[in-house]
Image (cartoon, rainbow, N blue to C red):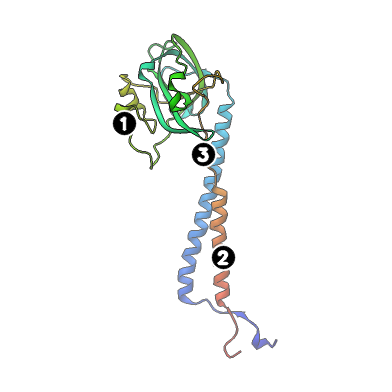
Amino acid sequence: MTAAGRRRFHRPTFWPTVFAVPALAILIGLGTWQVQRLEWKTELLDRIDQRLALAPVTLPAGVEDPPAWDYRPVAVTGRFDHGAEMHLLARTLDGQIGLQIVTPLVRTDEPQAPAVLVNRGWAPEAALDRVARPEGVATVRGIAALPPQRGWLQPDNDPAENAWFWTDPPAMAEAAGLAAVAPVVVYAADADPDTLPVGDQVRVDIPNNHLDYALTWYGLAAVLVAIYIAFHWRRPPGD
């Protein structure tokens, strides 16, 4: 091939450069943002794992810093108010649909403390009559967690029908006739696997796909650069 027939990089043209440079900056910026999110999410998940490994402690009467108690093993003692039992509908376990039972626990270990909403666990809706409802003073061990945020597809709760689709502590307190409840929910451990409800229903459902997202944005940036170079890498005129 003669020198005249060889491809060479031509001087960048105006409009392709005007569009390519900002687009490249945006793609690299999005990739870098996802890397930062990856670091934050990894630290969060590590912190949750560390908290879950801690020994249970008594939930204080006043939870001054609720996020500090998110995913903390705790113990609370009191009496269940089964008359105010609430049902979180459309909950699945091992492919079976059912509900989760949330019951206020009026504390006796901290008499001045507000009641605690205890997610006692999962049960089939048709088996509510077989759910164990302990009377008297009980000590509940489990995981404290902030109430999950309402999903954008979740319908409104219907307290009058005891139909709850998301955990709403203020509304649940009102439905139970309580002035207030603790700002965290306690997910009870599964004390007896042979009885209902099935405990241990706390879920660490925090996706961490930021590495994939970062690679996607950086990959698109590399493709843009390759297209830009290929566009300007042309044969000389008249070849």
Q: How crowded is mark 2: few (under 14 residues within 10 Å), some or many (20 or more)?
A: few
Label whose residue precedes the other's in the sequence (1 or 3): 1
**What residue appears at the point 33 percent right and 36 percent down from the top-left corner?**
156
| Foreground disc of the pair 1, 3 | 1
- Gap in Å between the C-alphas at discs 2 and 1? 51 Å
**What residue appears at the point 51 percent right and 22 percent down from the top-left corner?**
142
**What residue appears at the point 37 percent right and 13 percent down from the top-left corner?**
112
Instruction: Please determine whether, in this image, residue 171 is positioned above or below residue 150.
Output: above
From the viewer's perspective, is 50 left or right of 106?
right
- Residue under label 2, please give it: 223
- Gap in Å between the C-alphas at discs 1 and 3? 27 Å
| Foreground disc of the pair 3, 2 | 3
Image coordinates of residue 220 in percent, x first then y, are: 54, 61
Image coordinates of residue 35 in percent, x first then y, are: 55, 49
- Residue under label 3, please give it: 206
Instruction: Please determine whether, in this image, residue 41 is positioned above or below residue 55.
Output: below
SS under mark 3: loop
- What amino acid is at disc 2? Val
Give the quarter of the image for residue 91. Answer: top left
**What residue appears at the point 57 percent right and 51 percent down from the top-left corner?**
212
- What amino acid is at disc 3? Ile
State the mark number for residue 158. Answer: 1
